[in-house]
Amino acid sequence: MNNKAYPATVLLVGILLLTALLATIFLTKSTVIQQERAGIAQYQAYLQDKFALIELLQQDENTLCQQQQQNVVEFTRPHLNYRFHCLDKDIFSGKFPTRKNLYGNDFHQFTAYIENYAIKPITSWEELPKSSLSHPQIVKADNALIGHLTDDFYGILVTEYPVELYKGGKFYGAIYTPRKVFLSRFISYKREVIENIRRDYSIWQYQENSRHLMTP
């Protein structure tokens, strides 16, 4: 009986070893497949980041600076980091209008700056455009303005000519002129108007040679 049992024992051991070997092979193959899938997914994510970066590089940096209005425009993804710097060209790079200098002193600097914009010219108070506290306007007069307003105006007036305003609507904002102005209680400083002018008219520009790209 011992001679007959021995081959059966060997056969059983062989089956067990083969089973263990096959299990190891399957587990190893499964691990390899999972690693390959993870690698493919990671590479796909990397390519997506690259394509997104290519699309970003096709955009104008000055436009992005103006849209985001931040010192640093940054594009961060898991596989890369791209950023560049912006410069804020403040419309009030000279003296900021205040209640004490309602009639701005930096006339020539301010007028040079607003040449970049299509500023509405007016010849009388009646020609002032529609405005509001949240959307003030800048206007330029090439002759004397004497009279009254039918509606309140929010914004900045630029002129080298005499300005007089009588009873009626009020002017809220500031006046840029190199001459003395007839003081009127209908012309009032309003800081929120000036801040909104700064928001709408200041220019953000790309800083040359400030691009920086980091990849793994």
Image (cartoon, grey):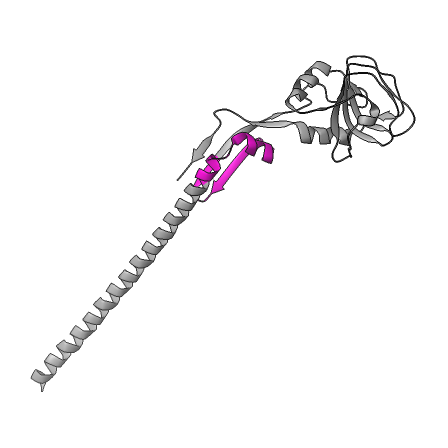
Is 54 colored magenta in this rendering? yes
Query: Looking at the figure, which quarter contains the N terminus?
Result: bottom left
Looking at the image, which residue sits at the far bottom?
1
Residue 76 visible somewhere in the drawing: yes
Query: Looking at the figure, which quarter contains the C terminus?
Result: top left
The residue shown at (92%, 26%) is 167
Up the image or down, 102 lies above or below 7; here it is above
Looking at the image, which residue sits at the far left?
3
Name which quarter of the figure residue 130 lies in.
top right
List x then y, in percent, for residue 21: 21, 67
List x then y, in percent, for residue 112: 66, 17
Position of 51 compared to 67: left or right? Answer: left
Is 75 colored magenta in this rendering? yes
User: 2 and 79: which one is in front?
Assistant: 79
Q: Which residues are magenta?
A: 53-82
Position of 153 compared to 35: left or right? Answer: right
List x then y, in percent, for residue 49: 43, 43
